[in-house]
Image (tube, grey):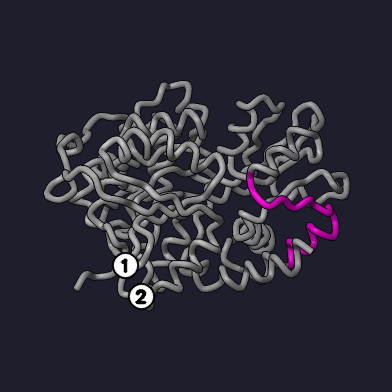
Amino acid sequence: MTKRIDRPFGHMFGAPSRRDFLVGLGAAGMGAAGVAAGATLALPGAARAQGGSLVVSNWGGDWNERTVRFVEEPLVEGKGIRITRDLGMEPERKAKLLAERRLRRGTVDVLHINEGDSFEMFSQDVLTEIDFSKVPNYADVVPALKTRPYFTPWLYSGVAIIYNKDKVPNPPKSYAELFDKKWVGKVGLTNQLYFNYIMMGSLLAGGTVTDGEAGKAKLVELKELVQPRIYAAHQQLGAGLATGEVDIAINYKARGLQWRNDGAPLEVQYPEEGAIAVMFGAGLPKRAPSPELAHVYFDAMLDRKAMAGLAGASFYAPANGAAELSPELRALIDFTPDQAAALKFPDYAHVAKNTAEWLEWWNKTITR
């Protein structure tokens, strides 16, 4: 029987804390020195086999498009492995896998997910531990990000304030400054980040991200004071910024950089309270029909060239310390040492207990 491990951030058997790692990253960047030689070796056993089929559960839109372009087509389908893509928002995809727990064999081999949801899915017997000996490129992942044996870390960012520099000459420098009537109708939120917004409210109410009730009360205050526009997904929010429907968005730094790269006159403000951190990756469903091929997929996700391509296209920072990024790109997508030190890492045990109730509350209270 495998032993379940849920180590809190910063307690990884002597490894530097995640925040310590990010501070170092902001100061000097992630170097490729010391990369394990085993990272270039072929996968053992059945994972070397060509062919077979794989079902990948992922978000749709531009996120999936980049996944296909940099990972799936060249590094997985290029091996002759057929991929069926099961695309959708995370609540629906999580519900599907929760329903499959009673089945002897499930329908999904790879689950794209954020770190918090991975904790929840493992706690509910949906995900299983990954055999990272079958994922050679995992050796390149910086040690401070190897926090969960059931989660392949991939890309990370933080929740920042994104604004139209042509229309907002004096942008809010903190989450707290968004609570001002001068921003009525000018702030955009997305349903995809409901849990981050509750954490933001909690941070403002009491200095931590774990008081959900206080966080919800602050969001009600924001709704009444600012009347934010609510968008279904990131893409719609980005379009709202581009067309001038809203002037400010609370979203990932990476998304702001993406939209600016697409031509929108945007800038990104790191909040004075410290940005709420987020990391994305993938997990292995316990009842996956093709677990060996799932390990091939995880290795492809962490390919250093693939991760460099993803970073350049998405502006998320890569978990692979050997990703081949230019110094200019690394400086753009990383955080400064002070910003890294101020990042707020969620308590995912707390999130897992509350996320379903939070989503129901968000839908009934904020989106209506």
Asked whether, in this view, residue 349 is left or right of residue 133, the answer is right
Q: Is residue 207 visible?
A: no
| Magenta-colored span | 217-234
Q: Position of residue 19 (x, y in %)?
A: 43, 47
Asked if the residues shown at circle 1 and circle 2 are in contact, with their CB atoms under 8 angstroms apart, the answer is yes
Looking at the rendered structure, the number of numbered marks drawn on it comes to 2
Q: Is residue 180 visible?
A: yes
Q: What label sits on residue 287 in the rendered view?
A: 1
| Residue 9 versus residue 186 in the image, above or below | below
Q: Secondary structure at mark 2?
A: loop
Amino acid marked by disc 1: Arg
**Residue appearing at x 13%, y 47% in the figure:** 44
**Residue appearing at x 62%, y 54% in the figure:** 193
Asked whether, in this view, residue 42 is left or right of residue 219, the answer is left
Question: Could you tell me which quadrant the N terminus lies in?
Answer: bottom left
| Residue 29 versus residue 117 in the image, above or below | above
Q: Position of residue 205 (x, y in %)?
A: 69, 62
Q: Residue furthest left?
A: 45
Q: Residue furthest bottom?
A: 102
**Residue appearing at x 32%, y 39% in the figure:** 77
Observer-nearest of 263 and 73: 73
- Residue annotated with mark 2: 103
Q: Position of residue 362 (x, y in %)?
A: 69, 65
Amino acid marked by disc 2: Leu
Observer-nearest of 113 and 159: 113
